[in-house]
Image (cartoon, rainbow, N blue to C red):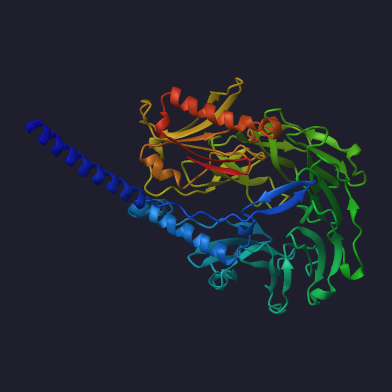
Amino acid sequence: MIMSNITRLFDSVNVIQKRTFIKNFKKLFQRIDLPPIPKQIPQSSFYFNIERVDEFQWMQDPNNQDVREYIAAENEFTNRMMVNTKLLQRRLFFEMKNKLITPEVVSPLKVLSNGYEYYTKHSNYGTIYYRRKKKSLSNEEILLDSKKLTKANKQIKSVLLSTDENLLGYLVEQEGDEIGSLHFKDLSRYNNYQNEILEGVFNFLWGTNAHIIYYTVTDEQLRPYKVYAHQLGTSQRNDMLIYEEKDYTSFVDITSTKDQSFIMINSNTFSSSEVRFFDAHHDVSQGTPELKLIEPRTSGLEYYVDHRDGYFYILTNADNCHNFKLVRTRIENIRKKYWETIFTVKETERIEDVDIFKDYVVIFAKSEGLPVLMCHELKSSKVHQITLPTNLCAVSPEINIDCNTNIVRFTCNLPLAHETTYEYNMKSRNLYSIRSKSINDFDSNLYTCYRTRAKASDNTEIPITLLHKKSLIMNHNNPVLLRSYGAYGITTDPDFQLEHFPLLERGWVIALAHVRGGSELGYSWYDQGRLMNKKNSFTDFISVVEYLISAGYSNASKISAIGISAGGLLIS
């Protein structure tokens, strides 16, 4: 009897506990905050006689009220999910902002031309453009102040001086727009061009005649396709059409050769080029300039042109030279059959850019995914390599407007330091740092950056760039941020990334995976990670993760990844 009463008592307690548990369990699920789910409205479209149904096509319209409400709901959900991290967010923001504080005053980078020094200074209100007489400590002249534009939510897209340096053209665009309005300023103060504005401009440049401007406009799809000539002091309605590109897959750009001899009209697709040129001294008041075609477009043929002393210097992938080569030809014999090869690279190297000078051509290339700068002497055809302070960096050419000099200027962007600008004397072979700044409150001597390799599933070696504290212990327990791209031939460069520093200081390892699909190791590296070989980009990424674990850097629970490949963003 006593036992049966006790049993009934426990049964009643169990019932109460079960009810309480179920009630609390329901409350737990009620507290789960689910993200907003967009509605699905199937819409059909046909491409190549194949029907494609898109349930979310309605979200392409930013003016749709439902789209606006959904975006607001997404933002509210994000704020709720991140509410417990607000203190950490503020701390990280302060740390990264603190890294940008420069302890010393950094002098502006100056460009010398015709007895003037041109430079910019930056403030909280925008960029200010200056010039002054060379080596003068006074008479600093403000050419352009973007303060008022910044307040109006506008920005300066480009600024160019006329060839006689008396006129300034600057292209202003509304933030987010692709086209803008072109304004002019007379630095000699003899003329007032304040009310002369060209609308709908995508890009522009000055002719050698200082009162003629060439510019491009776009079609409804924002594709640059027409080139016009404008003479200052006349209406835009009277501007002369120089060229119209009717192939909707081609984008038109205008450039001038470095020696200001020719204007180049470049029609480019993603896999072909077609370049026309005309005399930069042409007077449009005398009629339309004669356009000369260098080489008709051919699928797969890309080429880019500059000029020096009667020769066109052409960077091209012609003759299956996928990593590009440098050729030249006389302006009298411009077709491809006359092109003479003067510089090529190896299979694992790639030419990214060239800069033409009077006596030298500077070649910006990549070898095994690392930057290489070479100087090709035009008279002797001798080549020497510029010794960089480190090859674990990203190198880019600076503005080198003077072709009659032996000095080339370029910038090195390092993963553990702010960028440094160098000048190199190609004749004496001396390298000088002309501007650098340290990272505030950061001792780079405590950290290391180096290259290692992982073996892919097909035994291909995948380069990896690693950054971490020198005191790192290989105990399989370090947090890792793995980054990669692996698409469209875009490289993952070891450059300055502000967001890396809070992680490095907290003991993280930063790993850059140079997987196939990028072009770090040349065209073949890119080709092995696209189309039917696309899976290599992903299996390479997995092989890098496996290497980081087996080598003792981390374990599977402490590796996070961010990357973009085949148009998709991966964050895990």
Extreme-top residue of the structure: 459
Residue for point 76% across, 50% down:
46
Q: Is residue 144 above or below residue 481?
A: below
Q: Which image quadrant: the N terminus?
A: top left
Residue for point 45% across, 47% down:
499
Q: For this rendering, which residue is in front, 332 or 134?
A: 332
Q: Is residue 117 above or below residue 145?
A: above
Measured from the top left, where is residue 172 in percent x and y? Answer: 65, 68
Q: For this rendering, which residue is in front, 530 or 252?
A: 530
Q: Is residue 374 above or below residue 45?
A: above
- Along the horizontal axis of the image, is 222 left or right of 422? right
Residue for point 46% across, 52% down:
35
Residue for point 56% across, 64% down:
66
The total of numbered circles placed on residues is 0
Measured from the top left, where is residue 345 in percent x and y? Answer: 72, 31
Measured from the top left, where is residue 411 in percent x and y? Answer: 58, 46
Extreme-left residue of the structure: 2
Q: Is residue 79 above or below residue 210?
A: above
Q: For this rendering, which residue is in front, 344 or 35?
A: 35
- Hey, which quadrant is residue 235 in on the image? bottom right
Measured from the top left, where is residue 287 in percent x and y? Answer: 92, 67
Residue 81 in sight in this render: yes
Residue 91 in sight in this render: no
Extreme-front residue of the structure: 1
- Along the horizontal axis of the image, is 225 left or right of 171? right
